[in-house]
Amino acid sequence: MKILLTGGAGYIGSHTAIELLKQGNEIVIIDDFSNSSSKALDAIKKITGKDFKFYEMDYKDREKLEKVFEENKIDAVINFAGFKAVGESVKKPLNYYINNVSGALVLLDTMKKYNCKKFVFSSSATVYGNPEKVPLTEECRVGGTSNPYGRTKLMIEYILKDIYTSDDSWDICILRYFNPVGNHESGLIGEEPRGIPNNLMPYIVRVASGKLEQLSIFGNDYNTHDGTGVRDYIHVVDLAKGHVKAIEKLEKEGKGLYIYNLGTGIGYSVLDIVNAFEKSTGQKINYKITERRPGDIAECYADSKKAKEELNWIAEKNLEDMCRDSWTYIKNQKQE
Ligand code: UFG
C-alpha cells in the first residue's frame, strides 16, 4: 500500500510512519512544520533504514495537494494534520476550524477527485465530552465537547459519516485516541510541544529536566481513587501500531465506516503517573496541588475490546515503558 500521511512529521504521524514502513508499506509525507521539524523525517529514515517522498506544504493548499495525488498513486490517507492544543483552540477558534475542518474537507474532496477512498482519521476521546460511563465504549454518547478543538474532531466524525452514507465505496476508520505519551525507544524522535506544555507528561519531563520548576496538579478532590484526575495513557508506539492495523483492515476488508477506541483500558491518576515516573526514571518531580482546571473531567478511560476483536490490536506497553520512553528523548535533547 502507498499511504499518504498528512502531518507525518508530527508526534503521532512520525511514529506511525515508522510502523508503516516496518510493515513494508510505502509512504508519502506532507507537512508544513507548523508544529514539527525536519529532524523527525531524518529520524524516521535512520530508524527504519527506508526512504520516502516528502512535500513541505500546507495540506489545505488544494493545488499542491492535487500535485501530490498526480505524482503518486495513493491508496490510502491518514490525516494527522490537525491542530491539537485545547487551550489555544479556545483563544483561536477560527484557526482550529479552518485548519482542522476546512483542511479535512479539502483533503477529502481531493481524495474523491482522485478516486482514493480509504481514509483513517485521528479522532479523540474528547468527542465523548463528559463520559456517560467508564470504561467508554464506542457506542457511548458523543457530544458536549467543551472546546473548539474537541468540536472540530466531532464535526469531522459527522462529516465522515455523511460522506459514507452518500457513497459506501469509501472505507473509513475513525480512531479515537485516549492520552498518547512516550516516544520511540531509540530516543531519536519525540513530542515537542511549542511553548509551555498543556499536557501532563510533557510537563512532567520538563520538570524532571529542570526546564520547568514545578508541576501543578489540577485538583485532588475528584471522585477518583486518590482525588486526582484519571486518564487512559497509551504509549505512542502502540497507538502507531493501531493505525497499521486500521490500514490493514481497510485494505483487506474495507467496505465500511469503523470506529475504534485506542486506549489501554486502564485508568491512572495524575499521582499514579508522577509516582511511576519517579520510580522508573529515578527523577524527582516537584509538584503542588492547585485548583481544578476548567473543563477537566474526573475520569476517562477506554473499553478497548472492539479494537482487540476487530483490529486484532492491543496496547502492549505498560506505564513504566511510557515513563521511561518519555524521559529518554528529553534526556537525549539535554545532552545534544
Ligand atoms: N494535569 C495536571 N497538570 C498539568 C497537566 C495536566 O494535573 O500540568 C492533569 C489534568 O488535570 C488531567 C490529566 O493531568 O487530569 C491529563 O491532562 P492532559 O492535559 O494531559 O490531557 P487531557 O485528558 O486533559 O486531554 C487529552 C488531550 C486532548 C484529548 C483528550 C482526550 O490533550 O487533546 O486527552 O481525552 F482530547
Image (spheres, helix red, strand yellow):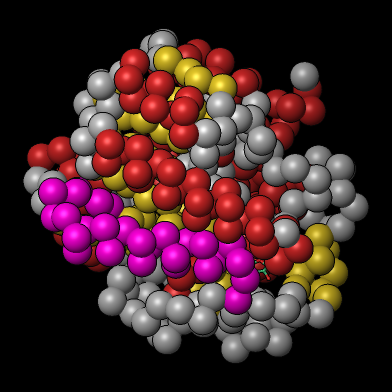
Q: Is residue 25 visible?
A: no
| The C terminus - image quarter | top right
Apparent side of residue 42 relative to residue 63 in the rendered image (left or right):
right
**Residue at position x 32%, y 58% in the image:** 160
Expressed as whole percent of the image width and height from the top left, the position of residue 246 reads 26, 45
154 vs 226, left or right, is left
Q: Quadrant of residue 138?
A: bottom left
Q: Residue at x 70, y 87 (%)?
A: 221
Report whether residue 4 is seen: yes
Query: Residue at 28% across / 76% down in the picture?
Result: 139
Front position in the image: 106 or 204: 106
Give the residue drawn at x 28%, y 64%. 162
> Which of the pair 89/287 is nearer the observer?
89
Rendered position, 264 above or below 127: above
**Chief secondary structure of the magenta portion:** helix
Against 154, residue 171 (above or below) is above
List x then y, in percent, for residue 261: 35, 62
- Magenta stretch holds residue 237: no
**Rendered view: 263 above or below 230:** above
> Percent from the top left, x then y, of residue 142?
40, 77
Q: Quadrant of the N terminus?
A: top left
- Please state the extent of the stretch shown in magenta in the rendering: 146-173
In the image, ligand 1 is in what quadrant? bottom right
Spot occupied by residue 318 in the image (x, y as percentages of width and height):
45, 51
In this view of the protein, which residue sits in the foreground, 157 or 166? Answer: 166
Number of numbered discs overlaid on the protein picture: 0
Does residue 105 appear left or right of residue 334 in this picture?
left
